[in-house]
Image: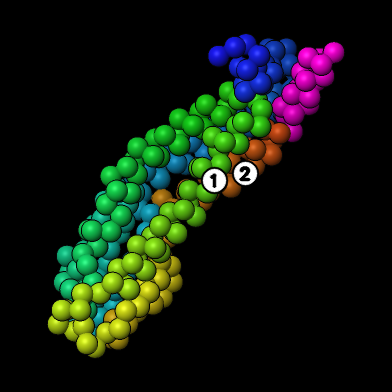
Amino acid sequence: MSGTLRDRILGPRVTPIMARTHSLRFGTPGILLLVARVLLLVSLFLPYWHMELQAPQYPDGLHMTAYLNSLSGDVAEIDGLNHYIGMRSLYEAAQFERTVGVFVMIAFVVMLELAAYIHTRWAVLLVAPVVFFPIVFLIDLQLWMRHFGLNLDPDAPLSSAVKPFVPTALGKGGIGQFVTIATPGIGLYLACGASLVLIAALFFHRRAYLPLVRAQAASGGA
């Protein structure tokens, strides 16, 4: 990579004197990026989604928890009930997403680390995927639930009594005597928090480095 191209991507460097004189201005973007990385790393170990299924034969309800890479809780029991209406096993949903989920999150952390060293608008390309991750997670979840609900097994014991339907990824739903309550997990809340922090980081990043980029461009033109 030539020096000119590298400078255009990485942007102007901050001298030690400038960093000391304007520590808040140049330090804020990096601190916010660090906070976002911590939130994402912590979210790896926490639930991203919960679902409770209420049924007459289960007075305490059935509970399922989804992490980025696994499912836990009463999954077998819920699958047993879903079998009667022709819905596939929950373990068959988002298999690829669960396989790569941890690696994607680690990649996000690395991308944010790199973004801290880029002082131009190219930093947005590294930050944007992380900002939109919670939305993509929920959209993917809803698409899988829609796919399962609209593609019921016609040979299931209760297939004639249940029409295809679209389960809800968040909120209250259900069919017949079964009621589902889906809620975000603490991990998803942390990912949303990281997105908000990153939006603030981009604002302070622009305010800190855009004047330097313009000065660099003017100097190069001169």
Q: Inspect the magenta stretch and tell me whether residue 217 lies in it.
A: yes
Residue 179 visible from this viewpoint: no
Q: Which amino acid does the dot numbered 2 rest on?
A: Ile
How many marks the image carries: the answer is 2
**Residue in the foreground of this view, choosing between 156 and 135:** 156
Residue 114 image offset from top left, x and y in percent: 52, 26
Locate residue 164: give its quadrant: bottom left
Q: Label 2: which residue?
A: 199
Instruction: Check the image and report above or below for 145 versus 116.
Output: below
Q: Label 1: which residue?
A: 131
Which residue is painted at 21% across and 64% down in the image?
89
Which residue is painted at 28% across and 44% down in the image?
99
Which residue is painted at 65% across and 25% down in the image?
119
CA separation in Å, label 2 and label 1: 7 Å
Residue 179 image offset from top left, x and y in percent: 33, 79
SS at mark 1?
A: helix
Residue 143 visible from this viewpoint: yes
Q: Classify residue 22 as left or right of residue 168.
A: right
Instruction: Check the image and report above or below for 9 versus 111.
Output: above
Q: Which residues are magenta?
A: 207-222
Q: Are marks 2 and 1 in contact (CB under 8 Å)?
A: yes
